[in-house]
Amino acid sequence: MGEQKKMKTAVIGCGMISDIYIRNLSKLFSIIDLVAIANRNVDKAKEKAAFFGIEKAMSIDDVAGDSEIELAVVLTPAPAHYEIIKKMLESGKHVYTEKMFTTDLEKAKELVKLADEKKLYIGVAPDTILGAGTQTARLALERGMIGDVTGGVVSINRNQNLNSELFRFLQEDGGALSYDVGIYYIATLVTLLGPVKEVRAFTAPATVHSKELLYTDEKKESWQIPGSNVVAASLCFESGALVSLHINGNTINSEQNIIMLFGTNGIMKVGNPDTFSGNTEILLAENEWVTLPFTHGYNGVNKLSEPMPFDHYGSRGVGAAELAYSVRAGRNNRCSKEYGLHCMEILKGIDIAADTGKTYEMSSSFEMTTLTPGYYSTVFGGFGRGDAECSLM
C-alpha cells in the first residue's frame, strides 16, 4: 500500500456528517491524502481544518482552481450537489458525493455524460454497501447459499417529520424518507440482486408537521417535507426477482427495518443497510436460522479515535477510497456514477409510476463486482487494526 500514489483530496461541506468523513479520509485509508477542507463559509472550513490538522481551508472555487487536488468529496445538502459536482468535473477533478446524487434525474444524467466526456470518475453514496454486512450477504448469494432469489420483502419506517425538526436539511428536497433513508435499502437491494427492470408503486406525501420539540430553535411553526414520505412499491429485477418495498416516514420514531430475500433453496435476512455491520442470517430447509460470520472488512468499528457523532458510520469514506484505487488501477469503481444513477432512477421511477398509475420501465443499468473477501477491519479479537484496505485494491 505504501507504494501506491496517494490521491490529493478535498472535502467540500462542513455539516454534521463531515467529521466522520474527515477523520476517516485523513487516517483510515492510505490511498487518500486529505489536503483541504472547503465550505461556502470559509470560516467553518478553517475551524474544521484546524480541529483535524488539515493543511488548507478553502472556498469551493479555490478547490476547483487547485490543480494538485484530484478528488473532491462533496458533503453538502443534496440541492447543492449538481452545481458543485459540475464545477469540479469541469475543473478536471474526480468526485465522490454523499447521497443523493442530485435532486433531479436529468441533471444526474448530464453529470454522468460530462464525466464520460472528460474521462473522470464519479462515486455516489451510500458506500455502506461496501461494508462487512452487505458484502457478506452478496458473497453468500454468489456462492448459492439460498439458491436463486425469487422474491423479497423490504420495509423501513421512521418519524421523518419529527426528525426534520432536529435535522433541518430534511425540510428540503431529498428530505423525504424515501430519499433520505430509503436510498440505503435501494442501494443494498441492487448490490445484492443487480439492476431493476420495472417499477410499480403507490405513494403518499409527508403530513404537515407542526413544531413539537420545545428545546429546538426551529423558527417555523409548521412545514411539509417535499416528496414521497410513504411508498408501497413493487420492483421487478432483471434477474426475475420480485421485491415488495415499503417505506413509511409518517409514523413513530422507533425504526423497524426488514430485508428478507426468498430463494429456491433458502431464505436470507440482511441487516440494517444504514450501517456497515448488519448481520446476515440464513434459513435452510430443516435447519434453524444461522448468522454468518463476516467475510469482509469495513465493519464500522471505530479504531481511530474516541467515540464521535455518527460512529455507526465508522467506515464512511470507503467509497471514496475505493474510487481512488480504481482510478489508479484504471478500472470502474464500485459505487460508480452508473450505480448512483440507477438507484436515483428507481426512486424517481417510483414517483412516476405512482403519479401515472403505470409501470415505469428503467432506462439505466450498472455492473458491480464483490470486494475481495478475507480481509478484515480488526484482528486479535478486535483489539488491532486489520488489513481491510487490501480488499479495495
Image (cartoon, rainbow, N blue to C red):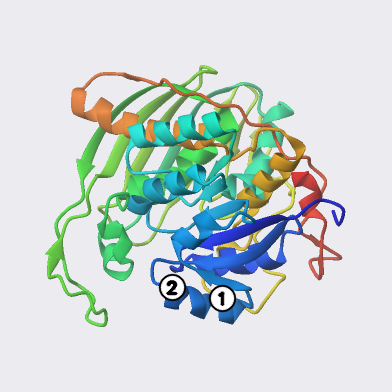
Q: Nearer the viewer, residue 226 or 37?
A: 37
325 to the left or right of 254? right
Q: Specify whether 294 is left or right of 103.
A: right
| Earlier sequence position, callout 2 versus callout 1 | 2
Where 211 sits versus 386, above or below?
below
Q: Which residue is mark 2?
A: 42
**In the image, residue 241 above or below residue 275:** above
In which quadrant will I find the C terminus?
Answer: top right
Q: Residue flagged by tag 2: what amino acid is it?
A: Val
Residue 99 picture location, percent across and down? 45, 49
Q: Categorize mark 2 by other alpha carbons within 10 Å: few (<14), some (14-19), many (20+).
A: some
Residue 141 percent location from the top left of the image: 67, 30
- State which quadrant residue 69 falls in: bottom right
Q: Nearer the viewer, mark 2 or mark 1?
A: 2
Q: Position of residue 81 (x, y in %)?
A: 40, 50
The part of the image, by quadrant, that contains residue 243 is top left
Residue tagged 1 = 49
- Residue 295 can be seen, yes or no: no
Taking the spot 77% from the left edge, 52% from the top edge, the residue there is 389
| Residue type (three-letter) at the residue carrying disc 1 | Ala
The residue that appears at 47% across and 42% down in the rendered structure is: 185
